[in-house]
Image: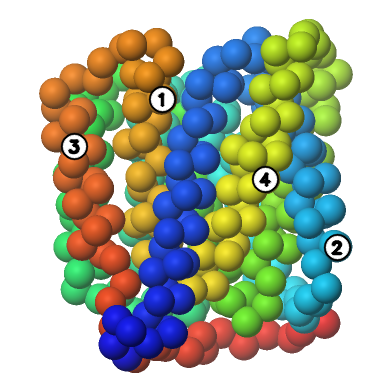
């Protein structure tokens, strides 16, 4: 497969979709700061808006693909846990620890993708993962200092779930991975319901607008883009591309607040972006997903 073939261009389009998804994901920190609500209430209400938005898009689409039941629920549960556990981890450990441990996801995606989907990582993928790890440690130069053991543990589990989600979505590449993302937001919204009564949110025009933006654009549109991209690139490639999220997060802070990142963070960001470029899909034979299950 050459760079001029449709398959190669399709891979590039898939990586671009995941990258745009990461750009949208990276804006969450700024908008969450605008909302003085319990973090699980934010996650739940944001997912409720996302579920409504994605349902409208999903059922307006004329294409109906068969469901793969176990991977549908596996992907949905994995991403719902990713969102909820990450919110809780942010309350129990430092934000740097939470994002650093969550983005161990490419490693889990590589291992699970190899085991479940038959997509053996290439040498460049392993090199990219090593670069990402080094870049993240430099980006958050204090490493894993501070924070609680419980918070760090939940953040790590969030990373495992994040990697697993990409694999389950990849298994559905001949179906519609967006269904798993829709299910994830339904589950996340359901998890947030009890917290709405335990910590009632104080409504204001700013908080409502922020929730609507996050639900429709920041996580709703992003989920559709991720589902679109994962059908065209491997699970590990998707996770490596998504690592652009923590790099871009301080960019928005710089633009809005003027807060400048440290020099070490800039170098770490450059290394991570370089790793994403190194891992970019190249021409070569595709692999068929070996995972089999009952369809409905």
Please say whether residue 290 is visible from this viewpoint. Answer: yes
Using the image, tell me which numbered label, if any, was put on residue 114. none
Q: Mark 3 against mark 2, which lies toward the viewer?
A: 2
User: Residue 246, relative to residue 280: is it above or below?
Assistant: above
- Kindly identify the residue that appears in the image at 82 percent across and 54 percent down: 55
Quadrant in which the N terminus is drawn? bottom left
Q: CA distance from mark 1 to mark 4?
A: 19 Å
Foreground residue, 66 or 260? 260
Crowding near pointer 4: few (<14 within 10 Å), some, many (20+)?
A: many
The first of marks 1 and 3 along the sequence is 1
- Residue 220 - label: 4
Question: As drawn, is 236 to the left or to the right of 220?
Answer: left
Q: Along the polypeptide, which appears first: circle 1 or circle 4?
A: 4
Mark 4 or mark 3: whose residue is earlier in sequence: 4
Label 2 residue SS:
helix
Mark 4 vs mark 3, foreground winner is 4
Q: Considering the numbered disc 1 on the image, is that residue within a helix, a strand or a loop?
A: helix
Residue at 65 percent across and 32 percent down: it is: 214
Q: In the image shown, does 217 or 142 lie closer to the viewer?
A: 217
* Residue highlighted by disc 1: 252
Image position of 20 with respect to 110: above or below: above
The mark found on residue 59 in the picture is: 2
Residue 230 placement (x, y as % from top left): 52, 67
Q: Are marks 1 and 4 in contact (CB under 8 Å)?
A: no
Q: Relative to residue 156, is residue 43 drawn left or right? A: right
**Total count of labels:** 4
Residue where numbered disc 3 is placed: 268
């Amino acid at each position: 497969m050459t760079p001029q073939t449709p398959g190669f261009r399709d891979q590039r389009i898939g990586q671009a979709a995941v990258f745009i998804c990461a750009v949208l994901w990276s804006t969450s920190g700024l908008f969450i700061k605008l909302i003085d609500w319990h973090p699980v209430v934010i996650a739940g209400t944001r997912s409720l808006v996302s579920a409504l938005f994605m349902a409208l898009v999903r059922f307006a689409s004329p294409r109906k693909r068969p469901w793969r039941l176990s991977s549908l629920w596996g992907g949905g549960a994995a991403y719902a846990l990713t969102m909820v556990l990450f919110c809780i981890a942010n309350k129990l450990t430092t934000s740097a620890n939470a994002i650093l441990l969550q983005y161990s996801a490419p490693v889990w995606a590589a291992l699970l993708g190899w085991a479940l989907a038959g997509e053996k990582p290439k040498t460049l993928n392993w090199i990219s993962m090593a670069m990402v790890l080094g870049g993240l440690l430099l980006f958050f130069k204090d490493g894993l200092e501070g924070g609680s053991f419980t918070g760090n543990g939940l953040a790590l589990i969030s990373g495992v779930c994040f990697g697993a989600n990409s694999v389950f979505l990849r298994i559905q590449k001949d179906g519609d991975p967006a269904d798993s993302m829709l299910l994830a937001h339904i589950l996340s919204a359901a998890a947030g319901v009890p917290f709405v009564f335990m910590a009632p949110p104080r409504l204001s025009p700013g908080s409502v607008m922020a929730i609507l933006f996050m639900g429709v654009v920041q996580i709703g549109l992003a989920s559709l883009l991720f589902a679109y991209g994962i059908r065209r690139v491997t699970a590990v490639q998707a996770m490596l591309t998504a690592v652009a999220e923590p790099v871009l997060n301080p960019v928005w802070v710089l633009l809005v607040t003027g807060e400048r990142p440290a020099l070490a963070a800039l170098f770490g960001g450059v290394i991570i972006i370089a790793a994403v470029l190194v891992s970019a899909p190249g021409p070569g034979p595709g692999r068929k997903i070996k995972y089999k299950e009952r369809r409905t």
